Image (tube, coloured by chain):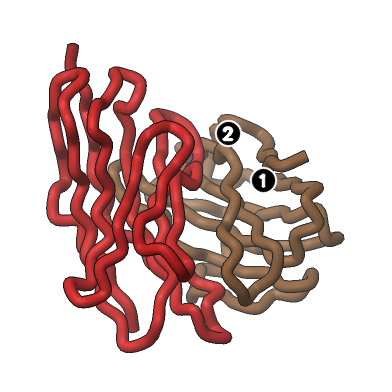
Chain colours: A brown, B red
Amino acid sequence: DTEVTQTPKHLVMGMTNKKSLKCEQHMGHRAMYWYKQKAKKPPELMFVYSYEKLSINESVPSRFSPECPNSSLLNLHLHALQPEDSALYLCASRMGLAGSNEQFFGPGTRLTVL
Amino acid sequence: AQSVTQLDSQVPVFEEAPVELRCNYSSSVSVYLFWYVQYPNQGLQLLLKYLSGSTLVESINGFEAEFNKSQTSFHLRKPSVHISDTAEYFCAVSDSGGSNYKLTFGKGTLLTVNP
């Protein structure tokens, strides 16, 4: 299995809702990433997990809360989002935090905040 | 700190024409270089990468890129494009040292192949 899966594919939520995005990989990768991508822009790094521990938080607002329950799974919990948070959220994984290995990206979750 | 410049935001070409997408980077350390492709409404897929060794790297679908250290460039080329190559292309760099967890992306180049 050489892919990263993300669910749901699309999500529409109100500003008072709580929802979660899910990312899964079964490649034995120990580094996992969340990115946010606005239209016609490159991905922006949000969080990095290494060996299930949060390594990097790129000054992301607390309304985004990441969780890594095990080495295969990465969640992003959403609460009280703003319309400007509407974007494509991409998950990626990598064999380890360092080294020459590339990041493998999932297909993304298209989030719309009303 | 590293940076990546993709000089062309859009490149329109006709089918079967050659294409070059330009990428220049800036870094004070040795780097790894990547080209990712993003088709509409999809995630990013790795197209090719330069880590070390031969400066010319090739992908399975006919793209190639050449690492030029003196010009700090990693331009992407294809001798004959297809309609299906229409996509956004991102050049990215990471440092080859111990803290290379992060990819720095260029702003992307939209390649549009017309019939």
Q: Residue at x 30, y 81 (%)?
A: B27
Whether residue A66 appears in this view of the structure is yes
Q: Residue at x 60, y 43 (%)?
A: A106
Screen quadrant of the C terminus of chain B: top left
Cα separation, mark 1 vs mark 2, equals: 9 Å
Screen quadrant of the N terminus of chain B: bottom left
Residue B29 at x, y = what percent?
Answer: 37, 86
Under circle 2, the secondary element is: strand
Q: Which mark is residue A60?
A: none
Under circle 1, the secondary element is: strand
Q: Which mark is residue A21?
A: 1
Q: Residues within 10 Å of mark 1 (few under 14, many from 20)?
A: many
Mark nearer the N terminus (1 vs 2)? 2
Whether residue A86 appears in this view of the structure is no
Left or right of residue A67: residue A108: left
Q: Which mark is residue A11?
A: 2
Q: Residue at x 32, y 39 (%)?
A: B88
Which amino acid, mark 1?
A: Leu
Q: Residue at x 16, y 46 (%)?
A: B9
Q: Quadrant of residue A21?
A: top right
Q: Is residue A18 above or below residue B60?
A: below
